[in-house]
Image (spheres, grey):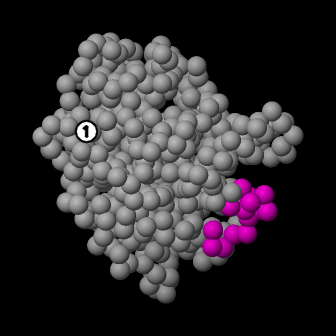
Amino acid sequence: MQTHFSPEQLSDPLTARSNKILRTCVHCGFCTATCPTYQVLGDELDSPRGRIYLIKEMLESGRPADEKTVKHIDRCLGCLSCMTTCPSGVHYGHLLEHAREHIEETYRRPVADRFLRWVLKFVLPHPGRFRLALMGARIARPFKGLMPDRRLRAMLDMAPRSIPPVSRNDDGQTFPAQGTRRARVALMVGCAQRALNTDINDATIRLLQRAGVEVVIPQDFGCCGALTLHMGQEADGKARARDSIRRLLAAEEGGALDAVIINTSGCGTTIKDYGHLFKGDPMEAEARRVAGLARDVTEFLVGLGLPARVGDQGQGMRVAYHSACSLQHGQQIKAAPKDLLSGMGFTVLEPANPHLCCGSAGTYNLLQPELSSELKARKVETLEAVAPEVIAAGNIGCMMQIGGGTQVPVVHTVELLDWATGGPKPAALGA
């Protein structure tokens, strides 16, 4: 793609990077075949190729974002399926980040939009606030028909029927390895996950301990920055990322870390990109250190090896595996979760079109509820078509999204692996 940025514009490192990305695109259109929003809407401007043209024109002209551009960029899930498909290696993810930041800096959103985004920023990265908000949503749910904005109704629908008690395992501490210590890791406990499903971290800790891993929970760990970075709020996201880097590296005071373990794949994609986020920043070296240590829990366990199966619980159980976009496209981890489940005796089933997003995508299901609902319905249909006894995923957002559209139990991959190796039966599977 030809670009026409001025020398003055190219003196900005962010613009220079976007210029290189734009010039990589050859307009082939392969990305349209795997873009979820294009599949639903059929509009070229709701495909990666169309959005690239909009971003190019906006950045090249140096103008503020307009309503049309904002509409189509906001509709993008950021699922990165286009990057997996692209034969030219266009880094659409970094281009999208630039576009979102430019929109936040130059576009005055309507009052309702600004309010909703402020609420998300104020609530979701803070487990205590999020827990209180979920309790409030449960109380308000019977009155959701009175809400004038569908996005507010979507927020009420998001609240689970029951809110788990706080898990003290998420507090800063160290869990010793069982048997001979084979590795020492820090576990990133997440933010929203601590309010929505505390079983995931509990199962992860037990499973790693059983595999001979010492697990360190960093003190007062907060949000990694992913939630606000996805909304184009770079300053806020970067501040949260700085704090996460400091707290994760502080865990090395008790000994070197072999890995930073992440069981929420959306966070994993962001943390593995910290080196890019902090390029040219005084904290770049520390950011690259953390990014280099970051491992999805399944990625780490494939390399280390699982503990032995205990008993026959779950043996042969039909498990439909949902591959989160942030795991398969953002981190290019596709086989590890399925291999681990198969190795533990589960019958792993893959739905049709596994590359397509479920519609969760961070805060997307709250900000774009109509499109999100359509994508959820399509994903649930393909998952249920394989007649599973349980659905497994590696991301809390996907779990909540899919669980809201099916009666099939939805669990995290580590919950099944923990159960097979001696842990408790996942609560979602019943007594």
Q: Quadrant of the N terminus?
A: bottom left
Residue 98 appears anywhere in the view = no
Which residue is outermost to the right? 146
> Dot 1: few (<14), some (14–19), or many (≥20) neighbours within 10 Å?
many
Residue 34 position within the rendered picture, expressed as x and y whole percent measured from the top left = 48, 40
Rendered view: 71 above or below 62 = above
Q: Which residue is mark 1?
A: 209
The one nearer the camera, 194 or 153, is: 194
Above or below, 250 against 45 in this view is below
Please tell me whether the stretch drawn in magenta is mainly helix, strand or loop. Answer: helix
On the image, the x and y values in percent for residue 319 come to: 40, 20
- At a point 41% along the width and 63% down the height, the residue shown is 244
What's drawn in magenta, residue-wise?
Answer: 104-118
**Residue 378 higher or lower than 61, as above or below:** above
At x 44%, y 59%, the residue is 220
Q: Choose between 413 and 364: the one closer to the eye.
A: 413
Name the amino acid, label 1: Gln
Q: How many tags in the picture?
A: 1
- Residue, far left: 180
Figure check: 361 above or below 219:
above
Does the stretch in magenta take in 110? yes
Question: Residue 391: x percent and y percent?
Answer: 46, 24
- Horizontal side of 328 relative to 407 (left or right) equals left
Image-based side of 112 in relation to 126, left or right = right
User: Which residue is located at x 12 percent, y 40 percent?
Assistant: 180
